[in-house]
Amino acid sequence: MDNPKQYRSLFILIIFISTNMSHADPKYSVPVPNGPSTTGSVFLPFGKITVEIINDIGNTLTLKYHCKSKDDDFGKRSLQPGKSWSFKFRRQFFGRTLFSCSFALPNGMYSFNIYEDHRESAGDDWCQKCVWKIRQTGPCRFNDVTKQFDLCYSWNKSLYSPRFNQEELHNI
């Protein structure tokens, strides 16, 4: 008969590995130069994922945003026009990694799941380096096949007001 203690140790090891690998590495939370680099041709399921955000809202507008996951909070930040910021992390073992960002735009406040495991790690549109241009119409991700920012999405349905005052803008 199988020894349950053996399986218990294996189960604990798997839980430890999956929990430890899912946290973002704050030392990689730094500005990066503009211009996406390709993800390459090999998807590394346990390699580090990079998410890069580029301010493409237009004119001379500063993008204010706040990104976080269940385990990591990068705080309130801002990006000058055309500038970018990125962070790195390891995917959760069971494929439930999720990072969400809220953005203050001239016409309101919006949110978007900037990294969803089921969207970014499956099919033809997977990415190891997920580069996003944030536009007023919604976020668009760099497509390694077409070499364009043509994987565009709508903003999340949210409770954000379509208009906000200056105090709300400074609080994001």
Image (tube, rainbow, N blue to C red):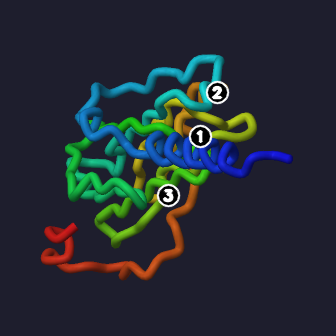
- Residue that appears at 45% across and 54% down: 99
Residue ID for mark 1? 150
Measured in 3D between alpha carbons, the distance from the residue under mark 2 to the one under mark 3, in whole angstroms, is 23 Å
Q: Distance between the residues labelled 1 and 3?
A: 17 Å
In the shown orientation, is residue 144 left or right of residue 1? Answer: left
Task: Count up the numbered dots.
Answer: 3
Up the image or down, 149 lies above or below 92; here it is: above
Along the line of sight, the residue nearer the viewer: 120 or 73? 73
Whether 9 is drawn above or below 73: the answer is above
Q: Residues within 10 Å of mark 2 (few under 14, many from 20)?
A: few
Residue 19 spot, x, y in % from top left: 48, 48
Which residue matches tag 2?
146
**Three-letter amino acid code at the position of disc 1:** Asp
Residue lying at 52% horizontally and 67% vertically, measured from the top left: 156
User: Splitting the image into 4 quarters, where does residue 42 fall?
Assistant: top right
Q: Of 127 and 71, which appears nearest the observer?
A: 71
At a point 33% along the width and 38% down the height, the residue shown is 25
**Residue reaching furthest top?**
41
Q: Which of pointers 1 and 3 lies earlier in the amino acid sequence?
A: 3
Upstream in sequence: badge 2 or badge 3: 3
Where does residue 6 sit, x and y in percent of width and height? 67, 43
Residue 113: mark in rendering: 3
Viewer-closest of 19 and 114? 19
